[in-house]
Image (cartoon, rainbow, N blue to C red):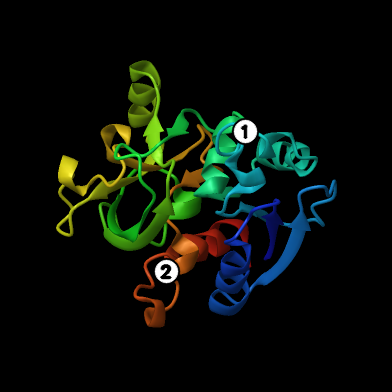
Amino acid sequence: MKFGIITFPGSNCDVDAMHAVADALGQTAVSLWHRDRDTQNCDVLILPGGFSYGDALRAGAIARFSPIMQEVVAHAERGAPVIGICNGFQILCESHLLPGALMRNEGLKFICDWVHLRVEGTAPMYLNAYQPHQVLRIPIAHGEGRYAADDATLDGLEQNGQVVFRYCNADGTVTPSANPNGAMRNIAGVTNAAGNVLGMMPHPERAVEQLLGSTDGLPLFEALLSRVGA
């Protein structure tokens, strides 16, 4: 399978994503520049974390106008996998490929820490290698990670199984104290209605080796191999 990792000015997790795909997953990974208009026939596109365009205006607001995003939208509309991690999640929301928005953290401080997530939702493209309600240990690093949407949108996401990761305690209990950034309903990750576009604030690409503290992010990428084909 061929993965395209998109680099925007200010991206800082693109190399992490390349390592996760090429070294941990053993798949082909190519680097795509934000000005590119060719995705090189990649099966999966990843928008990595960082601070695209310095988070000017607001996180992801300028990156959505990069030339490559026209190809990302077309890729998504074909039903092909698109993953946005941290800043990538913000860009996908700004591009309206995902509902909602990412706001400043509730405490107005940048957070770099490990969190626990509970696997939820009905997105087999990304969740098939996990058990229902499995608890994951994944790192976060963001200042604008508070997921927000109106009640109707949130209700729709819940009913459609589009909430795929939720902040929780180590035992899987969803509580306000387990919520690092004040995200509405403890939401850490969502998909589009079709289930092929995933956005999440935690960094699965930084949890693919035990040496780094966890391998809980690797099954997310492994699920793609069985759904899309190696």
Q: Amino acid at mark 2?
A: Ala
Q: Residue at x 62, y 62 (%)?
A: 14
Front position in the image: 18 or 159: 18
- The residue shown at (52%, 43%) is 89
- Is 69 left or right of 129, judged from the image as shown? right
Residue 207 percent coordinates (x, y):
42, 69
Q: CA distance from mark 1 to mark 2?
A: 27 Å
Q: Position of residue 119 (x, y in %)?
A: 31, 51
Residue indicated by mark 1? 61
Q: Dividing the image into 4 quarters, which one contains the C terminus? A: bottom right
Kind of residue at badge 1: Ala
**Quarter location, residue 177:** top left
Q: Position of residue 219 (x, y in %)?
A: 43, 65
Q: Which residue is mark 2?
A: 207
CA neighbours of label 1 inside 10 A, class few (<14), some (14 to 19), many (20+): some
Q: Is residue 123 left or right of residue 134?
A: right
Q: Nearer the viewer, residue 159 or 205?
A: 205
Tag 2, which secondary structure?
loop
Mark toward the viewer: 1 or 2: 1
Residue 114 disc label: none
Which quadrant is home to the N terminus? bottom right
Marks 1/2 in contact by CB < 8 Å: the verdict is no
Extreme residue in the right direction:
37
